[in-house]
Amino acid sequence: MGHPSMPPTYSYPSPCSKKSRSSQIQPYTPNDNLNNALGSIRVLGLELIAHELEPHLNTVLANIKERKKGAAEQVVISGILPILALSLRSRGPLTLPTAKLVAELAKESVVRKGFGDAGLAPALLSVLTSLDQELLLHAARAISRMSYDSSKLQHLLLRRGAVPRLVAILLRFPDKEALEEVCLQALCNISGMGVAEEAGMVWERGASVRPGETVFHGVSPHTCDFASSVTLVCVSQWAPGQYAVNIEVFQRCSSSFWSLHGNKRNARWFPFSRLGSFSNLLKMIKFSTRSVPGTKSLRNRVFHTFL
């Protein structure tokens, strides 16, 4: 029982440390400013009048970034997600601020659960054909975050052709590191690998061994100076305009680990001797986007991509 003069307070379960947002949420306080902005978007949204809606989108974005407890729930209750999908599909002046907001909302598990029913998945994918690099960055980031821990959204994005669009961006903008990193992370999360932004994975281009092949290495920091995971993404052209994407995850042990074990490398642990320090194939997924069988395991799917 609280003091009779104090407003009621609400508590929510803390997010798991593996979720895409691990920072502590600030205490919730009633926010009329956020409520007014959400109400305005709900009322004016179908009109999509940029000069009227953009300030309200920015208000919601600012409130979500503050991470106040209950703000994400207010967005869900407001019912604005289908309006955001409509704004993305319109490809007008509101598309960029909407993509920024959707990318930020995708950090919140309670919000991204509704992305599928709201039509945000196909709306975001439609944006990936744009030439605006900032827009592509926010759209790909939203896709990466929404598919982080949701097999439902992963399957939806696969069926809707997310892989060929992301591969097309990788090939179209080879020198844009930020865009490259977010597209690679999106590919990994769509494949079900659950690569969190907080993992601090560092991506770099690797050496290609075959013509028409592009290789990326993603390395996570060492844990206790003993081991780190290495993600290998290989985009290979197998016909004109057609590509296959292979994603593999290995465990790599540091020199400290081998020193601790007397430099005894057990071949049973490291079957991929040709890869040197790479070890233990954890997961391998091959993509080609020609067809997506609905009954097979995600790990065994093979798709072909047409660009």
Image (tube, helix red, strand yellow):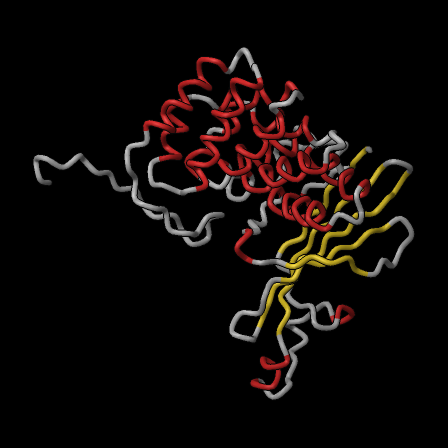
Question: Farthest top residue?
Answer: 47
Residue at 70%, 72% (x, y): give it.
Answer: 277
Count of all numbered marks drawn on residues in the image: 0
Residue at 36%, 47% (x, y): give it.
Answer: 25
- Front residue of 292/30: it is 30
Position in image of residue 288 (x %, y %): 76, 39
Residue at 58%, 58% (x, y): give it.
Answer: 200
Position in image of residue 33 (x %, y %): 36, 28
Position in image of residue 92 (x %, y %): 66, 20
In the image, taking residue 2 as reference, residue 257 lies left or right, namely: right
Question: Farthest bottom residue?
Answer: 262
Quarter of the image containing the C terminus? Answer: top right
- Front residue of 69/197: it is 69
Query: Up-down: is 84 above or below 304?
Result: above
In the image, taking residue 102 as reference, residue 2 lies left or right, namely: left
Residue 206: name its quadrant.
bottom right
Quarter of the image containing the N terminus? Answer: top left
Query: Up-down: is 249 above or below 10?
Result: below
Position in image of residue 198 (x %, y %): 52, 55
Residue 283: name its quadrant.
bottom right
- Front residue of 41/270: it is 41
